[in-house]
Image: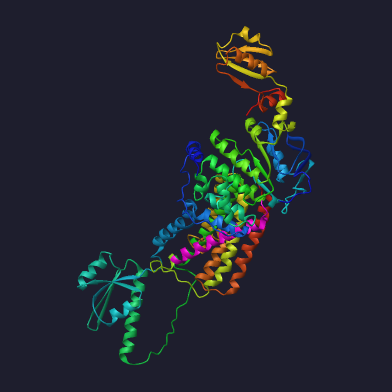
Amino acid sequence: MTVTGGQPAITVRDIRMRYGDLQAVDGVSFDVAEGEFFGILGPNGAGKTTTLEIIEGLREPDSGEVTLLGQNPWPRNLSLLPRIGVQLQGSAFFEKLTAREQLETFGALYGIGPAKAGEYLELVGLTGKADTLEQQLSGGQRQRLSIACALVHDPDVVFLDEPTAALDPQARRNLWDVLRAIQERGKTIVYTTHYMDEAEILCDRVAVMDHGKILAMDPPATLVRGLDAPTHVILSIGALTVDEARSIDGADDVQQSDVSLQISTRNPAPVLSTLAQRGALDGLQVRTATLEDVFLDLTGREYRA
Amino acid sequence: MSATDEITETTEETVAPRGRGRGRPPRPRKPSTKTTSSPFGAMISAGTKGFLRDKTSLFFSFAFPLMFLLVFGLIFGDAGADKVKLGAVGDGQVISALESTGAVEYERYDSLDAALQAVKDGDIPAVVSMQGDQVQLRFAASDPTQAGIVQGLVAGVTDKLNVAAAGGSPTFQLDSQQVEDSSLKPIQYLAPGIMSWAVAVSAVFGVALTLVSWRKKQVLRRIRLAPVTTSTVLSSRLLVAVGIAVLQAILFIGVGMLPFFGLQLTGTWYLAIPVFLCGVLAFFSIGMFVGSFAKTEEAAQGMSNMIVLPMAFVSGTFFPSDSMPDWLNAVSKVLPLRHMNDGMLDFLVRGKGPEAMLLPCAVLLGFTAVVGFLASRIFRWED
């Protein structure tokens, strides 16, 4: 891996892109450090994909500057391309080739011999599907193959555009393991998602985007902490009456629904110890703020995943 | 494979059901240990495998044109090879000499009366009978042309035998030699014509559909993100098209040359190769144009059909272009398939010399340049 003298792997300065009436990207700036797992989070149409495409060199921004590994990705920069790996949204494969042949073909585009294909099939857990035609793979398998194809030439920076979209929960979790394995190899990863929970678990830092703008950018834990959102303590109905709950020290708000009683507090420790003393812990759940709440707080509306 | 992977497999099957691919799954093979590869070779290999594993493209490239060759070969197989049907009674020099001209086909009768009845019934145009030195010819008056042919044939053979029997030399020497005329036996124009048409179909459809599907499936974008030059992508696909065309040529000419069809190549057949390659180039450029213009596979298919099918009919694929009205003949002269076809006929079956290469090659290359340029102007990496 070439270290670019402590410089960030990616520098984006005030990029803007307009499609007709739609300002898809509206003044986005950020840096991504080498080896960082950087997430761009936002609902569909937030401008995530366009931002990625501009950084990858697929589009020229209307204005603004991008530096990728010390170089300008636009126009198509043949010396830069071997150092970046891109998984496009939706998978791009040649017709009628097996999983192994897809990897071999994409590798060969970078001059990489077929020997590497086996290694990357194993990384994404597709060794058993090596000789299966791509169109006969399941959605999750295809997604993993697509990621392997983006990695086979051992790039320094990897771009993944919604790699976990449209996967069932089990397949998503399998993919998380793959993504962590890539990061352990020292790659810089830039990835987009509209899954809040996922970004929280995987990313070193996330940028929350909406309407072409970055609303907030920090490590997920910092974003959540900065929110100063109350912790919700949830109990089964009947564990406590509403009045009893209101009388607990530190309980800011109490609400009761058909199935549960919810105590909101900014000081959960004394609330929980009081509940423990009273033996009223039936069906206890504690929910702290998530990126979802951050999004709600930043945009004033529910997250539309 | 780990236990969690097993679970994934079963849960994911419900998302994407199996069995959408029509082709037979490729045989498993040993992993290679090669550590370098060329983009050019890999693109050719990917293109070839994609073609060979797609039953539809195999059918339209090989089986479909072959069906045309068989059907047209059978329909037109006898044309131009009609022999004069003649009743024969008895045996002798004249009867056997007539047969050796190769122009008559005998139907044997036991008696002259039976043969005469057959002439009267219109079953045969004439009967020739030989009893000792007596040669008798009786013909039907209904068809003067046939009657003339039969009379001339029998009289000619009899006279020749008379001169030979008299032991003298004839006063007038007849020097008769065969001349290759430009009207061809059907298989002589059918096999090269159907070959050119098949090559046109495969190149135009194959390239156009590949381009559209690569754009739709983002393969083009993915290639754009790899350090590969456009010329590598283009030339590798061109080479695949040439490979397919060569296979087609071998198949259709090979089948045509089977004794059943009787295609005969002339000594200059190899001069057809440059014209053939220029033809593939021209159709490749049309495929590029259609593939750059069309947004969906359906549109590409429709456009390709609109271009190739009418062109095939006026370019002498299924019947000789000389038999077309003059204006249509003139129109067809601007079409690449016409020139490829003419070039194939000139060298494969008419035995023309290298100078005849100039016009078809020039037209086809010019066509490639113009259409290729237009294609490059409207080419898009993505929608």
Quadrant location of residue B216? Answer: top right
Task: From the viewer's perspective, tell me whether residue A182 is left or right of residue A69.
Answer: left
Task: From the viewer's perspective, tell me whether residue A22 is left or right of residue B346.
Answer: right
**Is residue B282 visible to the viewer in this orientation of the structure?**
no
The location of residue A242, given as percent across then percent down, is 61, 8
B193 within the magenta span:
no
**Magenta stretch, residue numbers:** B226-254
Given residues B26 and A245, the one toward you in this image is A245
**Residue situated furthest top in the rendering:** A243
Please name the residue shown 77% across and 42% down the image. A11
Q: In which quarter of the image is the C terminus of chain B?
A: top right
Given residues A196 and A212, the one toward you in this image is A196
Please name the residue shown 52% across and 64% down the image. B246
**Is residue B114 visible to the viewer in this orientation of the structure?**
yes
Given residues A225 and A121, the one toward you in this image is A225
Task: From the viewer's perspective, tell me whether residue B377 is left or right of residue A256.
Answer: right
Please name the residue shown 63% across and 52% down the image. B289
Magenta-highlighted stretch: main secondary structure? Answer: helix
